[in-house]
Image (cartoon, grey):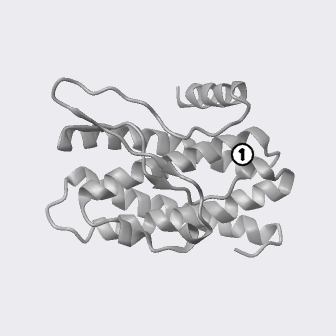
Amino acid sequence: MKKFLFVLTVILLLLCAGRLSAGEQGHGTANITSENMKYKSASPAMMHMSHSDMVKSEKEFVREMIPHHQEAVDTSVLLFISTDDPELKMLTEAIYNAQTAEILDMRLSYARWYNLIPTGFMYQSMMRDLNIVTGRERDIRYVQDMIMHHKGALEMAEKVLTFKGIHEETVMFAKDIIKNQKMEIDFMQKWLKKVGVSH
């Protein structure tokens, strides 16, 4: 089922000429308010800022992590379409499968805990545009940026675990991020070393 959904996403993106999704529209219910946010354009400084500063509560952690994950999903699908590297195809599919499921879980939890459905996001992109490069240069850019992207997620996850009284689901989710994304960072760093590129 996950494989089918991944392939379906790839097909839809191809039909949209490979353009990355910038947001998502949702609908509130009688008891749940729709919360509107927007994406911001990429900023080089964003790749090096402290993500722990963005998280001052459990609510902010979940709200910020949804678009953070979505950017990873979108760029992973784009690279999956174009790369010829089997290791990167495996990596991008793994990121897609894991983070798509986590986005759904976060949305459901956010709605249940705060009676809000986020419909878009005020989010500063962390990753450079993959559409302006091709071939191995695109592969390398994706991996370099995804390492920084994952490190940002680690900072956010480590920060939320310092808060008292957070939901058990958030504790487990944050611990999963730390475990899984550390392994992916290690994989990506080794891949860069193998192709002769610094981090």
Q: Is residue 20 left or right of residue 122?
A: right
Q: Secondary structure at mark 1?
A: helix
At 85% from the left and 51% from the top, the residue drawn is 135
At 69% from the left and 42% from the top, the residue drawn is 78
Q: Is residue 16 left or right of residue 21?
A: right
At 33% from the left and 26% from the top, the residue drawn is 27
At 53% from the left and 62% from the top, the residue drawn is 150
Q: Quadrant of residue 20?
A: top right
Q: Looking at the image, how many numbered discs can be counted on the residues?
A: 1
Please state which of residues 119 and 112 is positioned toward the viewer in this rendering.
Answer: 119
> Residue 148: percent from the left, percent from the top?
58, 67
> Residue 133: percent from the left, percent from the top?
81, 53
Q: Is residue 20 left or right of residue 81?
A: left
> Residue 92: percent from the left, percent from the top?
64, 47
- Mark 1, residue position: 79
The three-letter code of the residue at mark 1 reads Leu
The crowding category of the residue bearing disc 1, from other C-alpha atoms within 10 Å (few below 14, some 14 to 19, many at least 20), is many
Q: Quadrant of the C terminus?
A: bottom right
> Residue 24: percent from the left, percent from the top?
46, 34
Q: Where 16 falls versus 109 (above or below)? A: above
Q: Where 89 falls versus 170 (above or below)? A: above
Please state which of residues 13 and 188 is positioned toward the viewer in this rendering.
Answer: 13
Please state which of residues 76 and 188 is positioned toward the viewer in this rendering.
Answer: 76
